[in-house]
Image (cartoon, rainbow, N blue to C red):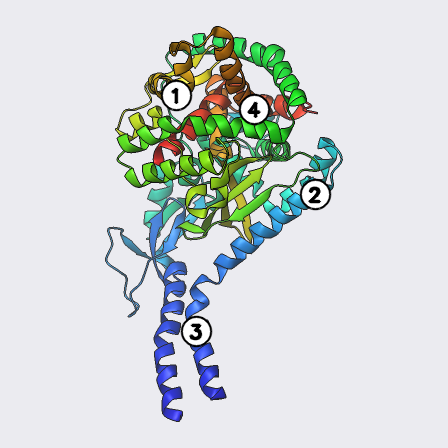
Amino acid sequence: MKQSIAFLTALAIPFFWLHTGFASSQTGSNSQIVIITKDGAKPAPLTKNGTPKNSKDTLFLRSAVKEVPLAPSPQEKKKRLKTSSAAAQSNSKKPTPKPANPAQRNADAKKNDTITITKKSPSVSNDDLDEYSDIAKIADPAEPINRGTFWLNHQLYNYVLRPVSKVYEFILPLPARKAVQNVFDNAEYPVRVVNHALQFQFKRADLETRKFLVNSVAGVGGILKVSDQIPALSNVPSADTAQTLAKWGIGHGAYVVLPVLGPRSVRDTVGMAGDYALNPISWLSYGGLGGATTLAVSGPSAARNMNERIRIYDSATKNAIDPYIAVRTGYIQYRDQAASK
Amino acid sequence: MKTRYLALSLLVSMTCGFSASTPDAENTLKKSVGEVIAIAKDSKSPSALREGLSPVLMKSISFDTMTRRAIGLGWRQFTEAQQKEATRLFTTLIIRTYSSKFTPGELPEISYKTAQYPAPGRVEIATTTLYKGSKYEVIYRLEDTGGWRITDVVIEGASLVANYRTQFDAEFKEGGVDAVLNALKKSASQSTD
């Protein structure tokens, strides 16, 4: 009994030591050896023996480092100089303070054998401020034209599509609208399965096929989305031609705003053409069906997306500083995420 | 036998000490989202929803971090007073933006996925939200700033902070600090009801 307790305790000690060792290497407590970072002097990471780890940074003794506040920005300097010169004009006899000179400061410090560094507030390091600088970058060489089309679309959404979608909501209750959505989603199976195959995602193509069969048969032609109840089929990522082009390494190209259709990139516009060619709904007009029949089928297909499109548009533009840029950024991020799936 | 189990549980608890903070982040998020959903369900109007959500969001979201990152490098050119003003105005915008995602009386279904740890002190928790018949992927980014608080919300790949960052960059390029503050004042003063 005693032997087993001793054995277990001996096993536990390394874990406990690792935990405290990990914590102290993170915080660097008890270290008089520091490295200089843009956030100020930080304890140098130490080995278990208490000696500094090998690194590219120069090591300093903490006692030899003196930290002073960051020098004021040029605007702040101008303001201070203005204030101080105004004070001088009002017969103040106090001398204008000279702005901090890093070279002079370091020269003074050398006399005292200390090294002076400027310490920035930890809450405003450049890394923190610049974290989102590279997100959603896209060329927009036709921005004036795009802004014009964006304005036209805004009028169209507000004065045409919004009232039409309200009528659509009034005529069809939510369960019926959901059924329409499911039928057309199911019919667009060729778009998804072909693009999964082009992306060499054959397992997803197989799942997409099973989903189509389950929803067509058990779901009565796609009206009921039975696949949502099957865990393996409920979260199959979608695929379209633009996503395939992205996976093949083709970049966005320039940003464009299409009339009615809204934001796209050049790549996604080409992708849209591919989706149109693969969509069975598009084949109706080439299948000898009458214009009325085609309209009866394609009309709800267009209407089913209207609500969602308006909702997404409102979500992006309400509370935006610049709605045009908000929609552009949101669109690019959304497409980048779709391409990464 | 009892001593043996005690020793084993001690061993297990020591090894689990590494991830003690991670359940805190997940629990904090779940608690905050639960409060938001409860308020959304009981609210009678968008303005009542916004007023009800405001105290919950104030304690759950790190607005100063969000504001700083949304404005970017230009933040260093703001005076302390301007920084406070920008944070106050941006807080109003974020509360309004987040509140507008919910409809009074509607209840979303949220399922939480496994948390990811991109860096020390940071957690990303992905969720799937079923709302009004549509499914959305929402990722909450939290940081440990003396307690876990949300620093970004990513809805279907679109980051809230990144979206405002691109807008503020354009304003800053046009007219610097004043242009950013004026744009914030204008947006925050617009009524959306």
Residues at marks 4 and 3, CA–CA distance in whole angstroms:
50 Å
Q: At label 4, which amino acid type do we have?
A: Ala
Q: At label 1, which amino acid type do we have?
A: Asn
Callout 2: SS? helix
Q: Quadrant of residue A308?
A: top right
Q: Quadrant of residue A16?
A: bottom left
| Disc 2 chain ID | B
Residue B24 picture location, percent across and down:
53, 57
Res A99 visible: no
Q: Which residue is mark 2?
A: B39
In this rendering, would A79 be left or right of A32?
A: right
For residue A279, the mark is 1
Q: Which residue is mark 4?
A: A320
Same chain for the residues under marks 4 and 2 in the image: no
Residues at marks 1 and 4, CA–CA distance in whole angstroms:
35 Å
| Disc 3 chain ID | B
Q: Residue at x 38, y 15 (%)?
A: A283
Same chain for the residues under marks 2 and 3 in the image: yes
Callout 3: SS? helix
Labels 4 & 2 near each other (Cβ < 8 A) = no
Q: Which residue is mark 3?
A: B12
Q: At label 2, which amino acid type do we have?
A: Ile
